[in-house]
Image (cartoon, helix red, strand yellow):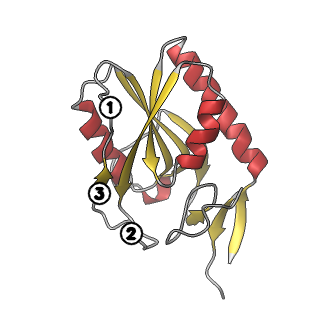
Amino acid sequence: MLKTLFTKGEIDDAVKRLASCIENDFDDEEILFVCLLKGSFMFLSDLIRCIKNTSTVDFMRVSSYGTAMKSKGEVTVTKDLEESIEGKNVVIVEDIIDSGLTLKVIKELLLKRNPKSLKICALLDKRARREVEMEGDYVGLTIDDGFVVGYGIDYAEHYRNLPEICVVEKDT
């Protein structure tokens, strides 16, 4: 059973607010957005359409869930960046900061590639499940706990197409 947590309107407002913060931080400088696939593609698409800075996009695919509702605790990079980030302003775009493990690994990996700056933009922050210290520089919405789907976020590759973000509730 799915229960709406954030409506499309609430998501749109958060995306616009995040875009404004990013624009303010980078003035007129170019930004390379690194989208963590697959869950972040809808968020990135809406986010970059709200940003006036010259922008480029690259993609990484990482996995820590598989088809489970809980992180496996292992982070696997299955698709790496296609271009160098050296000397560039980089914003990692993530759907949700959960355990923090994925972002910790990706941030450490990308910092070794000498970007000019490296920031993290997450649509959702779920602090209840944090296993490592990890903070987003730009966070759209916060949630307590629960497994969420929609707006690009999936469960076993389903529910990405929902326009809102829903929490999966166990049937009673």
Q: What's under tag 3, amino acid-wise?
A: Val
| Of pointers 1 and 3, the one earlier in the residue sequence | 3
Eye-nearest disc, 2 or 1: 1
User: How far across and down, in percent of the image, does residue 159 sit?
Assistant: 62, 67
- According to the picture, the residue beneath numbered tag 1 turns out to be 83
Q: What kind of element bears circle 1?
A: loop
The residue at the point 47 percent across, 23 percent down is 31
* 3D distance between C-alphas at marks 2 and 3: 10 Å
- Tell me, yes or no, whether the two marked residues, 1 and 3, touch with CB atoms within 8 Å: no
Q: Identify which residue, 60 or 27, lies in the foreground.
A: 60
Residue 123: name its quadrant.
top right
Q: Is residue 67 above or below residue 98?
A: below
The residue at the point 69 percent across, 32 percent down is 16
Q: Is residue 102 left or right of residue 40?
A: left
* 3D distance between C-alphas at marks 1 and 3: 21 Å
Q: Is residue 25 above or below residue 74?
A: above
Q: Crowding at label 2, few (<14), some or many (≥20) Cα neighbours within 10 Å? A: few
Q: What's under tag 2, amino acid-wise?
A: Gly
The residue at the point 63 percent across, 66 percent down is 167
- According to the picture, the residue beneath numbered tag 3 turns out to be 75
* 3D distance between C-alphas at marks 2 and 1: 26 Å
User: How far across and down, in percent of the image, does residue 10 sit?
Assistant: 74, 46
The residue at the point 32 percent across, 31 percent down is 83
| Of pointers 2 and 3, the one earlier in the residue sequence | 2
- According to the picture, the residue beneath numbered tag 2 turns out to be 66
Q: What's under tag 1, amino acid-wise?
A: Glu
Question: In the rendered image, which quarter contains the C terminus?
Answer: bottom right
Q: Is residue 136 left or right of residue 76?
A: right
Q: What kind of element bears circle 2?
A: loop
